Image (spheres, rainbow, N blue to C red):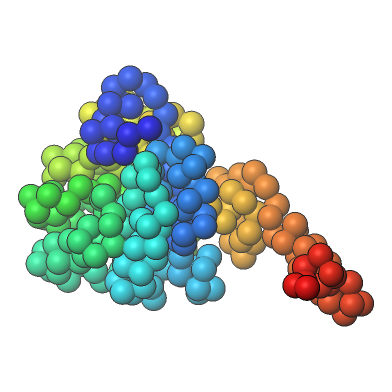
């Protein structure tokens, strides 16, 4: 299987093939995702919540994002690795945006970056693309704007809000993004945006009509329970299995069952 690139995303849209994306934050899970044939692995700033135990994505730093992206890249052979630009890594200036975006490729081995925002980040995306840094945009519910948005709410429900999202999507295409994440928007709006754009849409809580889907690894595997939006689907319950395994290990140590001679050297 060849390495997935931005061109592969565009080809999949042209051929009506769905794009698969999942988050990963470390070597073991990234290796599993890659072996499963996932098209793209997003090293999301969601690691602040699911790995660091924080309440929002806002506190995670560039250095932390670089660290996690680096170890994910080390595990991956075929999937595209995408570094998520964290809060204040691109909002201050275009120069900061290019410098921080470049770090994901130069230091961490990513092939692209993701950036939240619509028309307000047009200049940043254009500058990244001109610096040969491929960009995935992100509109709809934007976790970094959680305080302005007043919580984790569905976006684009009114006609005016929907029209703004459609306009933002077109602006992001013009800026040079090769794909757009649509988060927490009505499925009919997501279908309209998907049909109108020449680049693929990746949905998360945006219904089945997007060109691809992304979910958080820890949600898919049933490892994260603090926050469970409607749009997630758990395909396993690894927390329960891990809990049972560790409880059994504890019991065997306490009873002198482990280690046995089988796990000992003679």
What percent of the width, then of the height, locates residue 186?
45, 39
Residue lying at 62% horizontally and 51% vertically, measured from the top left: 221
**Front one among 115 and 243:** 243
**x and y percentages locating residue 201 in the rendered image:** 34, 36
Residue 16: x %, y % from top left: 37, 21
Left or right? Give the position of 205 relative to 64.
Answer: right
Q: For the point 63% across and 59% down, which residue is it?
A: 223
Judge from the rendering whether residue 246 lies leftward or rightward of residue 85; answer left or right.
right
Task: Judge by depth and name the residue closer to the eye, 78 or 202.
Answer: 78
- The answer to which quarter of the image holds residue 59 is bottom left
Q: In the rendered view, tell whether residue 51 sits above or below residue 127.
A: below
- The one nearer the camera, 253 or 216, is 253
Image quadrant holding the N terminus, namely: top left
Q: Is residue 102 above or below residue 202?
A: below
Asked whether 189 or 130 is in front, the reply is 130
Residue at 23% in and 29% down: 198
Q: Tell me where residue 62 appears, x and y as whole percent.
A: 29, 71
Q: Quadrant of residue 120?
A: bottom left
Q: Quadrant of the C terminus?
A: bottom right
Q: Among all residues in the image, which is located at the extreme front? A: 266
């Amino acid at each position: 299987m060849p390495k997935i690139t931005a061109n592969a995303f565009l080809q999949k849209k042209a051929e009506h093939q769905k794009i698969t994306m999942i988050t990963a934050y470390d070597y073991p899970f990234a290796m599993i995702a890659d072996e499963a044939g996932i098209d793209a692995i997003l090293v999301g700033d969601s690691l602040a919540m699911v790995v660091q135990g924080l309440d929002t994505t806002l506190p995670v730093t560039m250095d932390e994002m670089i660290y996690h992206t680096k170890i994910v890249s080390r595990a991956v052979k075929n999937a595209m690795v995408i570094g998520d630009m964290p809060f204040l890594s691109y909002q201050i200036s275009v120069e900061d945006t290019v410098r921080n975006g470049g770090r994901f490729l130069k230091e961490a081995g990513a092939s692209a970056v993701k950036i939240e925002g619509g028309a307000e980040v047009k200049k940043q995306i254009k500058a990244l693309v001109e610096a040969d840094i491929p960009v995935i945009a992100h509109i709809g519910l934007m976790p970094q704007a959680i305080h302005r948005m007043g919580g984790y709410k569905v976006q684009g429900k009114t006609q005016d809000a929907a029209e703004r999202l459609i306009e933002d999507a077109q602006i992001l295409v013009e800026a040079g993004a090769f794909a757009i994440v649509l988060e927490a928007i009505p499925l009919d709006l997501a279908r309209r945006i998907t049909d109108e754009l020449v680049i693929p849409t990746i949905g998360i809580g945006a219904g089945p009509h997007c060109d691809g889907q992304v979910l958080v690894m820890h949600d898919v595997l049933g490892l994260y329970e603090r926050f469970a939006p409607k749009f997630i689907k758990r395909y396993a319950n690894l927390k329960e299995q891990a809990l049972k395994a560790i409880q059994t290990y504890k019991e065997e140590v306490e009873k002198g069952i482990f280690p046995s001679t089988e796990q000992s050297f003679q």
